[in-house]
Amino acid sequence: MEVVKDLGILESKSEDTYAIEGIASIEMVDRDGDVILLDNMDLSGFKKNPTLFLQHNTWELGSGAGVVTDIWVGLDPEGRKALYFKAELDKDDENVQRVYAKLKKGIARGISIGFTPVKYVANEHGGYNVTESILNEISIVNVGANQGAYVTSVKSLVKDSASIAMSSKENSKSIVPSSDANNQMIVKLSEADAKLIAQEVVKLLELKEQEKSEVQEKSAEEIPDDVFEFNGEYVRIIK
């Protein structure tokens, strides 16, 4: 089961290299009623490929926005366990430059994690306590779903990185389970992402219908006058 939880926020300080810090997750009840416990979150696989993404775009080759240089579990100012990270963004990427400019203005400062729940139990908040999980990826997002996770500051330093405040977790709208309840995949998307995906689906369906119509018109043009369709087959009239 793959779950996406949006959790953080970012800011900016200098202009040499894009370095950021933040909280990717925090042990608190999120908007879905879930609590992600961090003691048994497996970070080993993530550390082998610590890519930072934008809006969970992990499927497109070359979509990485940067590299997570450090990640650890600590305590937030209120004494709650939090998943802290440091990262350096790809300064040469035009899309990252655009996002970084927004971060410096305090816009689109959300941080989100994608993870696989291994063990979880229902809780009194209508959600689940995820007691064991595997971290898959971290993304910069528009709005976070975990109210306690956000980025405080972003720096552009050659060898130093900035401190980041915690962000709110991205609002999650869609859940897509598989047929196997024990091995299901759950994907939670922001409202903006859901609209974009819906628009792309509509475009694909319209294109498919257009191609189908063109094929039918072409086929009709190629049928001779002495041929007609009967029970799904073409029949020629012989005189």
Image: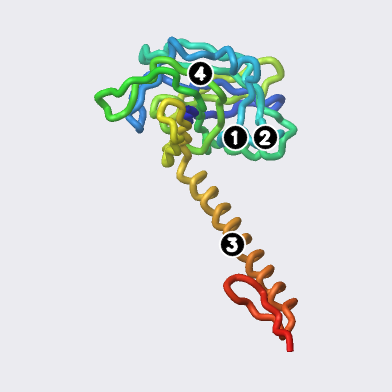
x, y percentage for residue 86? 59, 18
Q: Earlier in the sequence, mark 1 or mark 3?
A: 1
Q: Name the residue beneath numbered marker 3.
A: 206
Q: CA distance from mark 3 to mark 4?
A: 39 Å
Q: Nearer the viewer, residue 176 or 74?
A: 176
* Label ID, residue 63: 2
x, y percentage for residue 108? 52, 37
Q: Earlier in the sequence, mark 4 or mark 1?
A: 1
Q: Earlier in the sequence, mark 1 or mark 2?
A: 1
* Label ID, residue 165: none
- Front: mark 4 or 1: 4
Q: Amino acid at mark 2?
A: Ser
Label 1 CA crowd tier, 10 Å (few <14, some 14–19, many 20+): many
Q: Name the residue beneath numbered marker 4.
A: 134
Q: Name the residue beneath numbered marker 1.
A: 54
Query: SS of the residue at dot 1?
Result: strand
Contact flag, marks 1 and 2 (Cβ < 8 Å): yes
Q: CA distance from mark 1 to mark 3?
A: 28 Å
Q: Nearer the viewer, residue 22 or 138?
A: 138
Q: Amino acid at mark 4?
A: Ile
Give the residue displayed 50% in from the left and 32% down from the top.
110
Q: Earlier in the sequence, mark 3 or mark 4?
A: 4
Q: Which quadrant of the figure contains the C terminus?
A: bottom right
Q: Amino acid at mark 1?
A: Leu
x, y percentage for residue 10? 54, 29
Q: Is residue 105 above or below residue 86?
A: below
Give the residue displayed 63% in from the left and 16% down from the top.
69
x, y percentage for residue 87? 62, 21
Q: Earlier in the sequence, mark 3 or mark 2?
A: 2
Q: CA distance from mark 4 to mark 1?
A: 20 Å
Q: Earlier in the sequence, mark 4 or mark 2?
A: 2
Q: Amino acid at mark 3?
A: Glu
